[in-house]
């Protein structure tokens, strides 16, 4: 008779096969070993995702796994870090079975390999509550070069990667499918919004460029409006954003053309997992060129000002927008 516990068997079956780094010790120990790269600082990040809060319980298990890892990798990218590995903790309801775990582990393993971010260890538990996936990601930057959110300077230009608001609109459509027709986002446009919610795209490709050029940076998880305010508060500065310059996908643009009120969830809804960065004006062209070569477009959307904590999102009429809920918040 095997002397393995049920938890040991679960780990051996689903997660040991994807823990390929030698430091993981085959997941046979209760700790892992990591040798930091020479002359580097470690960058540490943990961001849990919870069913019915960060994902729908009926989302595909592989997509849940990929989202759990990618939201943490997005933070590493904003700090200019390259991934070294991650720890995984799972709180599993009783109705999670073999089929779900198999698909989850496959999605997690594929992303761990794709992003060169190996599984190093973790823990599993049963819970009477909601499914919770907690990942702690570890990254590295050359010593003293991590990009903070507290170092923006007046006169810096503000840029964002990719497009903004897609995920927030995708979540709304999941809750209210009829919105797709009223927004005119059927077919490929609808699929785009749903996919952007389901599977974030961490901008690790531009991590080095962020280190080289950005004066401050963070990823956008709680909405552009709220996260820009956080960056300005941390930097002791203010900022102006020109709303008309915020980059939108064809799908988000179509929805906004049908319903002008959609601008609020676009700017405040969260889950974009794009990069918000500030850069000295003299470095802006070089920064944009460097990221474009890597397949990631940056858009200049505003500037940092000297007025502490005065953050404005200015519409086409020159008047600041006011939001009912400026930022996503768990509390």
Image: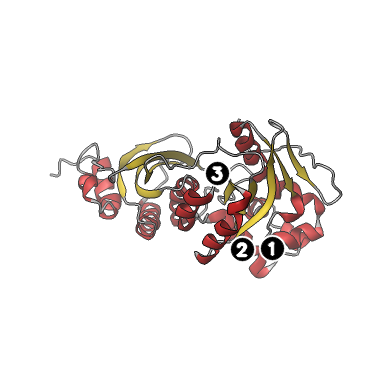
Residue 185, position in %: x, y? 71, 64
Q: CA distance from mark 3 to mark 1?
A: 32 Å
Report which quarter residue 230 is drawn in: top right
Q: Secondary structure at mark 2?
A: helix
The residue singled out by tag 1 in the image is 251
The residue singled out by tag 2 in the image is 192
Q: Residues within 10 Å of mark 1 (few under 14, many from 20)?
A: many
Which numbered disc covers residue 45? Answer: none
Residue 62, position in %: x, y? 43, 56
Q: CA distance from mark 3 to mark 2?
A: 32 Å
- Circle nearer the viewer, 3 or 1: 3
Relative to residue 235, is residue 100 drawn left or right? left
Res. 67 in view: no
The residue singled out by tag 3 in the image is 215
Relative to residue 57, is residue 108 drawn left or right? left
Residue 88, position in %: x, y? 36, 43
Q: What residue appears at the point 58 percent right and 47 percent down from the top-left corner?
A: 277
Q: Residues within 10 Å of mark 3 (few under 14, many from 20)?
A: many
Q: Outermost residue, left direction? A: 1
How has the structure been colored for display? Answer: secondary structure
Disc 2 vs disc 1: Cβ atoms closer than 8 Å?
Answer: yes
Residue 18, position in %: x, y? 29, 54
Q: Secondary structure at mark 1?
A: helix
């Amino acid at each position: 008779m095997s002397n393995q516990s049920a938890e040991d068997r679960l780990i051996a079956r689903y997660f040991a096969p994807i823990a390929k780094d030698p430091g993981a010790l085959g997941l046979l120990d209760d700790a892992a070993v990591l040798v930091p790269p020479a002359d580097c600082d470690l960058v540490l990040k943990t961001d849990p995702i919870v069913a019915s809060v960060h994902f729908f319980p009926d989302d595909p298990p592989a997509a849940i796994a990929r989202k759990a890892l990618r939201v943490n990798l997005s933070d590493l990218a904003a700090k200019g870090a390259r991934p070294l590995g991650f720890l995984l903790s799972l709180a599993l309801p009783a109705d999670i079975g073999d089929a779900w775990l198999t698909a989850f582990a496959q999605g997690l393993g594929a992303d761990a390999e794709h992003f060169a971010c190996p599984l190093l260890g973790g823990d599993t538990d049963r819970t009477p509550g909601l499914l919770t996936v907690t990942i702690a990601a570890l990254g590295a930057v050359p010593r003293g070069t991590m990009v903070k959110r507290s170092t923006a300077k007046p006169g810096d230009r503000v840029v964002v990667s990719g497009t903004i608001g897609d995920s927030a609109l995708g979540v709304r459509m999941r809750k209210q499918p009829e919105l797709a027709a009223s927004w005119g986002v059927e077919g490929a446009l609808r699929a785009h919004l749903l996919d952007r919610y389901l599977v974030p795209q961490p901008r690790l490709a531009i991590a080095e460029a962020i280190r080289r050029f950005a004066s401050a940076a963070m990823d956008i998880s709680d909405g552009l409006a709220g996260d820009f305010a956080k960056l300005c508060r941390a930097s002791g500065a203010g900022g102006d954003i020109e709303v008309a310059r915020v980059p939108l996908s064809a799908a988000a643009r179509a929805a906004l053309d049908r319903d002008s009120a959609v601008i609020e969830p676009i700017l405040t809804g969260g889950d974009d997992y794009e990069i918000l960065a500030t850069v000295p004006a003299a470095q802006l062209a070089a920064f944009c060129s460097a990221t474009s070569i890597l397949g990631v477009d940056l858009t200049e959307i505003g500037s940092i000002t000297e007025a502490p904590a005065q953050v404005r999102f200015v519409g086409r009429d020159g008047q600041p927008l006011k939001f009912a809920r400026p930022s996503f918040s768990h509390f």
